[in-house]
Amino acid sequence: MKGRIENLLNEIGALTAQVPDEVELLRLKYLSKKGLVSVLFDDFRNIPAEQKKEIGQLLNHLKNASQEKIESLKAAFDEKDEVHEQGMDLSRPVDHMNPGTRHPLSIVRNEIIRIFGQIGYTVAEGPEIEDDWHNFSALNFPPEHPARDMQDTFFIAKEPEILLRTHTSSVQIRTMETEKPPIRKIFPGRVFRNEAISARAHCIFHQVEGLYVDKNVSFMDLKQTLLYFAREMFGEQTKIRLRPSFFPFTEPSGELDVSCNICGGKGCNICKYTGWVEILGCGMVDPAVLENCGIDSKIYTGFAFGMGIERITLLKYQVKDLRLFFENDLRFLRQFTGTL
Ligand code: PHE
């Protein structure tokens, strides 16, 4: 009996059918009243009592397995019918899916946010349309300063002067006007300058500016922060150097160079054979600017820095022409597979 059950189990397990009618024939052959499986159940009556439990279990297993097998053969044809009716061809190669990539400027902006986020900087944003106070006056630009000139600034209205912000330093002012120190923030955003478009300049570009105001903030803190940033962005081996510079809203002011990550400092056309590339402007916030925002400059000091995202991206990815960032050429954009 055991042997017959096993043989049938193997036989049924191996069954196949080419057409739906064949499945019905198989069902009749095995599972109908006179079918091979049912016949075994009839013989069950003659089994000695002590074997009944074991054989009974085997028989039930056989019956379930046979029913499942017949059902699955049937289901396979049902599926095929459906595919056929809907005119689908499952063997057809699929269309290539393009998952898309982030824009390189977004990758680098997010990386800058991540790097400063690790040392406690949070992100703040401000309006792109600004007034003279937030973009210039509060930042200590004298009335006759050339940056206010029509050649640099896109003015929208006169009296009061409304303009497209020329830098994200305007968000420094907005933050200091509304928050009390300690302030530790970065300000990413779009800025506008009336400049001719070329490989190195555009009338719209992106900046990230940083501001740290607290008691006892020193130039040493600024330098160490920038060294940390440069190494995170361009690699552990990166060196920095600060050169004196001038901005109306910082005193002293500096410009930060990093060792050229393309030639490793040996000299190449990116660093104009100097081994160094400039990446940002910085300095200690001028006490007059703190006072303009209602912060007591006898108690608090601060530093600020500002960088162009395009410039960092050019250096990081060795892109030669800044216009590529704005042309939306997929052949260019698809090369950036950063996931940030
Ligand atoms: N706002 C300056 C610019 O656009 C950069 C800067 C920011 C310099 C903060 C010093 C401090 O060029």
Image (cartoon, helix red, strand yellow):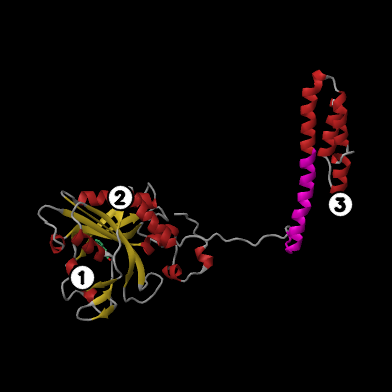
Task: Tell whether 125 sits left or right of 266.
Answer: left
Q: Report how far apart the C-alphas of labels 3 and 1 lie in the structure.
A: 87 Å
CB atoms of marks 2 and 1 within 8 Å:
no
2 or 3: mark nearer the eye: 3
Q: Earlier in the sequence, mark 2 or mark 3?
A: 3
Residue 267 visible from this viewpoint: no
Residue nearest the viewer, comparing 208 with 282: 208
Helix, strand or loop at disc 3? helix
Judging by the rendered image, the residue that carries numbered circle 3 is 21
Residue visible at 84% across and 26% down in the picture: 2
Q: Earlier in the sequence, mark 2 or mark 1?
A: 1
Residue 138 visible from this viewpoint: yes
Q: Which mark is residue 136?
A: 1
- Main SS, magenta region, reads helix
Query: Any magenta on residue 90?
Result: no
- Graded by Cα atoms within 10 Å as few (under 14), some (14 to 19) or many (20 or more), the crowding at tag 1 reads many
Task: Tell whether 291 sits left or right of 15.
Answer: left
Residue nearest the viewer, comparing 48 with 16: 48
